[in-house]
Image (cartoon, helix red, strand yellow):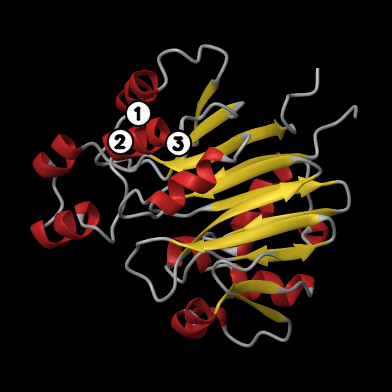
Amino acid sequence: MSHPPLQVASLGSGSRGNATVVRADQITLLVDAGFSTREIVARLARLGVTLDEIDAVVLTHEHGDHLVGAGTLARRVGCPVLATQGTFKGGAKRLGRLDNTQVLRPGQSVRLSHVEIHPFTVPHDAEDPIALTLYCDGAHLGIFTDIGTPTDLTAYHLSRCNAALVEFNFDPQMLRDGPYPWPLKERIAGRHGHLANDEAARLLNQCGAQQLQWVAAAHCSQTNNTPQRVRDALDRCLPEQEALSRLLTDQDHGMPWMPVWATPPVP
């Protein structure tokens, strides 16, 4: 095989918006749409993708930084929106009228073209939040953000991945000492909030990460984290895996196209 089964790029990741593009031979998916449609069009253009190439939108939950552009985009393109029943219910006002929907049920895989999407439940303060793995021709990609607590289920799915975007949201000391009001600090650090750097590191350690070709730190707070603290956490949890690429997604610039190969990687 001369090209990877899957390619993935981030349009941006953080509290001001999240969207990830996943491409296989015959299909292009948008996982989350947390920017306006106009902004999504501009960010797609940087990757050489047009809006009309989007074949489906997959939503992880109903918070605005993951969903705000989904309804308008889907109506403009005429593509389906896939989400859990709780996400459709919780996001109904923002989504507006949708003519083409598919309900995702955690634990039950669905297939779009030759990409298999497996949603599973994660702890987050939303109606029915999910993380995702996507599988195509032997390549596994994981998208694990907005996870309040590392769970055995998340570790299991991460252990099967060849590449993954993993939430490294906050540094505990920066959050404690930062400007946010205390109730918001408690929400972020709570069991249904976001993953701290050390929690994400423990999750990677727990799963072993032996099959990972690269890991991208995602949903990094611009207020309660720094790129260097994230890099330090990645290096601490993966000290012996020098061949593993460590990436950071950016709120404004996202992440460029990255390949996801089947195991073992294709030369």
Residue at mark 1: 230
Question: What mark, if any, has residue 197 been given in the picture?
Answer: 2
Please name the residue shown 49% across and 46% down the image.
156
Q: Nearer the viewer, mark 3 or mark 1?
A: 3
Q: In this view, does 44 lie above or below 124?
A: above
Q: Is residue 198 visible?
A: yes
Please name the residue shown 33% across and 25% down the image.
233
Please name the residue shown 35% across and 28% down the image.
230
Contact check, label 3 and label 1, Cβ < 8 Å: no
Contact check, label 1 and label 2, Cβ < 8 Å: yes
Check disc 2 and give the amino acid type.
Asn
Check disc 3 and give the amino acid type.
Cys
Residue at mark 3: 207
* Upstream in sequence: badge 1 or badge 2: 2
* Upstream in sequence: badge 3 or badge 2: 2
Question: Quadrant of the image for the N terminus?
Answer: top right
SS state under label 2: helix
Q: Is residue 146 left or right of residue 100?
A: left
Nearer to us in this view, 253 or 102: 102
